[in-house]
Every structure is written in C-alpha cells, then in structure tokens.
Image: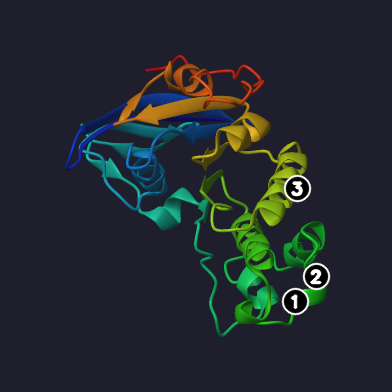
Amino acid sequence: MTLQVSVGKRLKFFDLEVSFTCEDKDMLVMIGPSGGGKTTIVRMIAGLETPDEGRIVYGDEVWFDASRRINLPPRKRKVGYVFQDYTLFPHLSLYRNAAFAAVDKGDVDGLLTLFGIDHLRDRKPDKVSGGERQRCAICQALARRPRVMLLDEPFSALDVVTRRSLREELREMKSGLSFPVVYVTHDIQEALFLADEILPIVEGKVDRDWMRRTITREPAPGTAPRAVREPRLSLVY
C-alpha cells in the first residue's frame, strides 16, 4: 500500500506545504537544512502534530483530512517511530523495552538477534552503549508490526563508526520490510546510501534542486572536488 501525504501548516518562520507518496518496501529520505520542517512532517504523519490543511492517507484508510475533520489518534495509525534520543524506559531491560508494545512477544527474540543485542537482553539501557540502545529502539518500533516506519535522525547522536555500522544494518534489513519507511537525516552521504527516493525539504517546501546545489558547491582551496553519486530526487512538489 501507499502512504500519501499532502499537508500544509503555518509555522513560526514560514508556511509548510508538501506533497509526496511512499510505497510499501520503499525508503523515502527527507533531507535539508536544520529547521526546514522535516521533523514536523514526520510528527504530522504520526499524529503527534495536526496540519492546518490537507490529507494523510495510508492505503484506503484516511488518517487525516482537514475538510472532513478526520484526525486519527496516533495509536490508531500504528506507526513505528524511532527518535534521535532513544525512547527507552530506563527501569526496563532491553528485552522488556523491545517487548513493551509488541503485537507478538515471539517476535522480540528474533529482532534482538537480528540486531546483535540478544546477549544484552537483561541489561538496562544505562548499561549498554548508545548504538546498542538505538538498536533496541528500532527493535521496539518493529515489534509493533507498524504499517509505516518513521525514523527521525536515529543515528545522529552516535559516533561515526557506530553510525556507519547501523546504517549498513538498516540497508540490509529494509529489503525484508513490507511497509513504507520515512527517514530524516542531515547527512547527504547517509541519504545517498539508504534512500530509494530523496525528498529535499527547505523552509517547508520540496526543493528539488537543493541536493544538486549542495553537492556541487566549490571545494575549499587546496582540496579536490568530491565524487558523488547522483541521487534519485523526488519531483513531487
């Protein structure tokens, strides 16, 4: 099924107006300058913020429709949401965190094994590394058997080596997912590595030239230009 988003919202410094779609099994990566509205878009998909206008539809189910006054609460949208700052319960073990909202507790062991943290199942979040906590947060989101997966800069607080390892694991895993994934990052190389489609967001609008402008900037004096892969940009705006 397809996630369809066409929303508008008045923010403090600009009006946000975006339209895009994301198919099952695809990863759409939103990228752009800080403060451009990416997290607001993800929160509107999740039902944590309300658009001023527009529609959000998954398959045949309307999650939000301003004209019809439809606004499903987050629990009915059944999305998996992974934040930057590890939404884990500090008093629960990694296993119990991952199992907290699991549809089937039988899924949890397999997910912990998949992400290489099964041996840490009985430890509390403060007894493991940041990368291990974030692996658990992803397991927690997947155990919900979400209809849409939302990842809002999930690796940005991690060190370079851990971040590279996790994004490689995520790319390997995504081929087995059956739902749309919307991923937010500021890292162009991460976007190029992970995305089936890239959606540049600048001041609340889709800016289809932002990637080209950014990756073709003049190199600093004394440095060689970087070779980059041309991204597949979204042309929906």
Name of the residue lying farthest toward the bottom: 91
Residue 219 in the image: x percent, y percent?
Answer: 53, 23
Q: Which circle's residue, 1 or 3, is located before the other in the chain?
A: 1
* Mark pair 1, 3: CA separation: 19 Å
**Residue 196 placement: quadrant:** top right
Proximity of marks 2 and 1: CB atoms separated by less than 8 Å: yes
Q: Secondary structure at mark 1?
A: loop
Q: Nearer the viewer, residue 210 or 170?
A: 210
- Identified at 80% across, 57% down, the residue is 114
Judged left or right of residue 170, residue 45 is left
- Residue 202 against residue 164 in the figure, above or below: above
Residue marked by disc 3: 169
Structural crowding at the residue carrying mark 3, measured as other residues with C-alpha within 10 Å and reported as few (<14), some (14–19) or many (≥20)? some
Q: Which circle's residue, 2 or 3, is located before the other in the chain?
A: 2
Residue 186 in the image: x percent, y percent?
Answer: 49, 40
Q: Secondary structure at mark 2?
A: helix
Question: Residue 118 shows which numbered tag?
Answer: 2
